[in-house]
Image: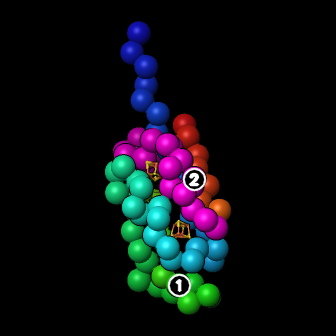
Amino acid sequence: MATKSKRGFIKIAAELCKGCYLCETVCPFNLISVSDKLNQKGYHPAVYDEEGIGIEKHKCKGCALCALVCPDIAIEVYRE
Ligand code: SF4
Ligand code: SF4
């Protein structure tokens, strides 16, 4: 029986982000980039590129690498 591949998504708390971009470096699918906007601390926060895209089209697998490397615990991971 075929198993459905897992899909996931993340939420990045822009106000907690200090702009180190470790998360961007580790994502195997390059799904994280840098916002043009500044947060209240004056950093350009990381943004998740699949925001607003239906989960059936997500490349994110919910592997949580991005959340594990974030020193500021700014990323939450969800899996379906
Ligand atoms: S690892 Fe955390 S603090 Fe660093 S850019 Fe990503 S979300 Fe921001
Ligand atoms: S959970 Fe994994 S696949 Fe999804 S954005 Fe983070 S590092 Fe990339």
Q: Using a 10 Å C-alpha cutoff, classify the residue at mark 2 as few (fewer than 14 neighbours), some (14 to 19) or many (20 or more).
A: some
**Does the Cβ of the disc 2 residue fall within 8 Å of ligand 2?**
no
Q: Between 58 and 71, which is closer to the camera in this rendering?
A: 71
Q: Tag 1's secondary structure? A: loop
Residue at 43 percent of width and 77 percent of height: 35
**Label for residue 43?**
1
Image quadrant containing the N terminus: top left
Q: How is the image coloured?
A: rainbow
Q: In this view, does 25 lie to the left or right of 79?
A: left
Picture coordinates of residue 48 (x, y %)? 45, 62
Find the magenta span and give its range. Answer: 54-72
**Does the Cβ of the disc 1 residue fall within 8 Å of ligand 1?**
yes
Q: Is residue 48 above or below residue 57?
A: below
Q: Can residue 23 be seen in this view?
A: yes
Image quadrant containing the C terminus: top right
Residue at 46 percent of width and 70 percent of height: 21
Amino acid residing under circle 1: Tyr
- Whole-angstrom CA distance, mark 1 to mark 2, is 20 Å
Location of mark 2 (residue): 68
Q: In this view, does 45 lie to the left or right of 58?
A: right
Q: Between 53 and 70, which is closer to the camera in this rendering?
A: 70
